[in-house]
Amino acid sequence: MGFSMSVLVFSMLVFTPLCYSEYLNPQFYARSCPKAQEIVRSVVANAVARETRMAASLLRLHFHDCFVKGCDASLLLDSSGTIISEKGSLPNNNSARGFEVIDAIKSALEKECPQTVSCADILAIAARDSTVLAGGPYWNVPLGRRDSTGASLSGSNNNIPAPINTLPTIITKFKLVGLNTVDLVTLSGSHTIGFSRCTSFRQRLYNQTGNGQPDPTLDQSYAAQLRSGCPRSGGDNNLFPLDRVTPAKFDNHYFKNIVGAKGLLNSDEILFTKSQTTMELVKTYAENNNLFIDQFAKSMIKMGNISPLTGSRGEIRKNCRRINT
Ligand code: HEM
Ligand SMILES: *[C@@H]1O[C@H](CO)[C@@H](O)[C@H](O)[C@H]1NC(C)=O
Ligand SMILES: *[C@@H]1O[C@H](CO)[C@@H](O)[C@H](O)[C@H]1NC(C)=O
């Protein structure tokens, strides 16, 4: 074996695992950008101090990213050239928010360590920091995701569960990305913070089954209260807290509400009314906040591992809204 061949084999053995690491790892930026996590945390903290809801909005962005082509920041791309932005999809239009905060994080990171930290990793860290700021659990975020060079509007429309989907459909959409019913119930617990528009639950108030009747599984006095701010027509964007008791606190009140027939979305309430397995877990979480909090961290790590681009796949975008030229 010649010298150059030995060098080649040696380099492959030594460097391949570093360059083509298949797995995400919390230490990924420890040497290349040691301040990365601190920078994300500080921008997120400022944004949430300005507006409490931003914690919820940033948490949701990671979910809407991961369910479409994996956690690859495809959600963040604006329309241009061949790209049709996911921001215009049914789940996202007039709803997904927080993109300017992601831009602010990215520009701070580009100053500190240019083209090093991916937009997909920014979303994952921001989701964790948002959870912590709202009073939820901390977890070490596995890192090393890279950014997509495309988006999928149809993926966004089809893969992200809709509030009017049946429970079997929602379970299937989770299963398609490797998440089980424990993950579904647990991650739905994100609805312990943040807001929904009237248009996302109106059907339950007026015509749930197509017979002109409200949803019988919705507490009737709560329904009446909701109807006063969410009329039959108009007021589509009027906002209501997903957790009516502690709307800004990351706790298990979401599950208590559901047990009391006061879950806001149809997709929340059916976790209690349409399957024995999910019903039992909702009850368990309603009674035990610690179990919810511990499993939430685990399920978030699992969601964050959905089909990342690693190694030399994808790119590190300079601007989260555009692919590099
Ligand atoms: C199980 C299926 C799910 C459905 C059907 C669903 C549906 C929705 C809907 C309809 C809204 C209100 C949007 C609007 O009206 O503008 C919402 C808000 C939200 N969702 Fe979900 N969601 C689901 C799972 C999740 C998951 C897995 C997460 C996070 C891991 C999440 C996090 C959030 C948060 C934090 C908000 C509030 C956002 C804000 O205030 O800006 N959701 N969701
Ligand atoms: C998003 O909503 C706005 C305002 O309702 C609407 O004008 C626009 O056409 C929608 N965009 C898409 C892509 O559907
Ligand atoms: C309720 O929905 C059904 C089916 O979508 C429709 O035919 C009916 O006109 C609606 N009724 C009311 C009172 O809105």
Image (cartoon, rainbow, N blue to C red):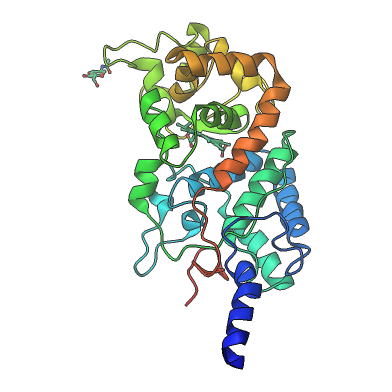
Residue at left offset 56%, top offset 54%: 99
Percent position of residue 161, x then y: 41, 35
Instruction: State whether residue 91 appears in this view.
Output: yes
Percent position of residue 295, x then y: 65, 30
Q: Is residue 171 above or below residue 303?
A: above
In the rendered structure, the answer to whether residue 200 lies left or right of residue 2 reads left
**Quadrant of the image containing the N terminus:** bottom right
- Quarter of the figure with residue 5: bottom right
Q: Is residue 62 or residue 143 the one in the foreground?
A: 143
Q: Is residue 275 above or below residue 175?
A: above
Percent position of residue 188, x then y: 54, 29
In the rendered structure, the answer to whether residue 65 lies left or right of residue 247 reads left
Residue at left offset 54%, top offset 31%: 183
Instruction: State whether residue 244 appears in this view.
Output: no
In the rendered structure, the answer to whether residue 9 lies left or right of residue 45 reads left
- Quarter of the figure with residue 249: top right
- Quarter of the figure with residue 105: bottom right
